[in-house]
Amino acid sequence: MPKYTEQEQEVINVHNVFWEALANRDIDLRFSCCSENVTFIGTGLHEKAANKAEYRIMNEKGVNQFPEPFQIEFIWTNISMFHKQAVVTCEVIWKQSINGEVSSELVRSTTLLNYEEDVWKIVHVHGSVPDYRLAEGEYMKTEKIMLRNRELEQQVYERTQELEHSLAELKSTQAQLIQSEKMASLGELTAGIAHEIQNPLNFVNNFAEVNVELIAELKEELEAGNLEEIKSIADDIAINEEKILQHGKRADSIVKGMLQHSRSSNGQKELTDVNTLCDEYLRLSYHGLRAKDKSFNADFKTEFDASLPKINIIPQDIGRVLLNLINNAFYVVAERQKNLSGIEETYKPSVTITTKNLGESIEISVKDNGNGIPEEIKNKIFQPFFTTKPTGEGTGLGLSLSYDIVKAHGGVIKAESLSGEGTTFVITLPNLNIR
């Protein structure tokens, strides 16, 4: 049995219910799976429907003619998906009793589905069915088959053109939204970067000022000929120069990290220290939020596994995932603090990042002690455009893009949450360097 993603399985479930309801002669259940604009094309010349009402009448006639339930067996099923559209093709054996005789027929179907109002709905069905499903007494002769094939080819061509046009528009929109989300996350980083880069620059300035004073003292001792004092001052200058170099490199790494985050990914993986990556994005996120809201405050800590190996990832992409999860964690603890009840006066907002070396994989956990995720929306949080934030505060793409990025790395992301206690997002990434 093929392994489907959660979203693919939802589509397959709707598809299977639709066809099993036909076998069970349950018209109401079958059409609960359909969009109001569903269309149908079959093998017989008369077998086509332009809307749900026509299609239902056609099905009701079939049930009246052959009311007995029959068996179906799926031979194979394929699924293709893009955003909010899905195509399911399958071959199925129908075993039906007609006039006391059991007939087994191989049928192929193509079913198109759209994601409408939080559920998958069938919008088009094309089924190749056996001759006995034609109008009573009618069998398709060669010339009719050829004519019908031409009609079907034209209809398929027109529908394909429409789908290709829709696909191109969706890809263009998706690219724009991804770029928008990336720039939004870069904006979140800006204030944090300013804070982080100020620290090493302060050290550089301070040690440079001290060296200016030491050099002046050095000149005085040179004139006096105090060799021992000259050596001592020179040693102090050398130590300060090392510290200037150290903090200069720190500032350089922050700037490089910002540039790496902002540029488009070239898809090239590189050996990356995940502990360092987590630490940098945790601090950048916290100081960025502090710069936007001076009243915001939260404890944040790291529990890093010192044995964590460097792994091959695209660092700017995984960094984007971490930034999104950490920003969300700080957001929910801040929201809980703003809405404290009397019994929660001792509440202290807290965010923790943990890493673990699992041998053939590594694990990253981002934990908060916010209000947790309500049970009724847990299965929606990775869906595109789903957000619990007020209008204007979230695109609803952060977790969806994070899910796609982790999946593209061969990993898994999941959420563990308890109401009133908080949420932990757990990322598992493979360590492909294990031989």
Image: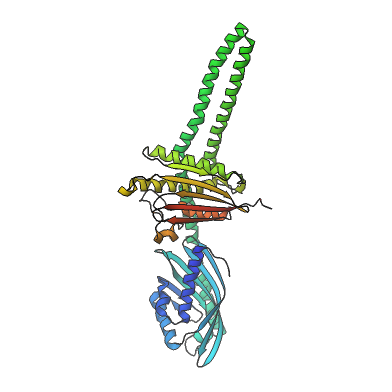
Total numbered badges shown on the rendered structure: 0
Q: Determine the residue located farthest toward the top in the rendered image.
A: 224
Q: Quadrant of the N terminus?
A: bottom right
Residue found at x 46% / y 38%? 192
Depth check: 180 or 417 in front? 417
Q: Is residue 95 above or below residue 398?
A: below
| Left or right: 411 as drawn, with respect to 382 | right
Instruction: Inspect this view and state whether residue 74 appears.
Output: yes
The spot of residue 212 in percent (x, y) is: 54, 17
Its colouring scheme is rainbow
- Residue 78 image-quadrant placement: bottom right
| Left or right: 256 as drawn, with respect to 66 | right
Depth check: 187 or 242 in front? 242
Q: Determine the residue located farthest toward the bottom in the rendered image.
A: 100
Q: Determine the residue located farthest toward the left in the rendered image.
A: 342
Instruction: Inspect this view and state whether residue 268 appears.
Output: no
The spot of residue 377 in percent (x, y) is: 41, 59
Depth check: 196 or 301 in front? 301
The spot of residue 318 in percent (x, y) is: 54, 48
- Residue 115 image-quadrant placement: bottom left
Residue found at x 52% / y 39%? 258
The spot of residue 7 in percent (x, y) is: 49, 63
Q: Is residue 150 above or below residue 423?
A: below
| Left or right: 240 as drawn, with respect to 287 | right
Residue found at x 49% / y 60%? 167
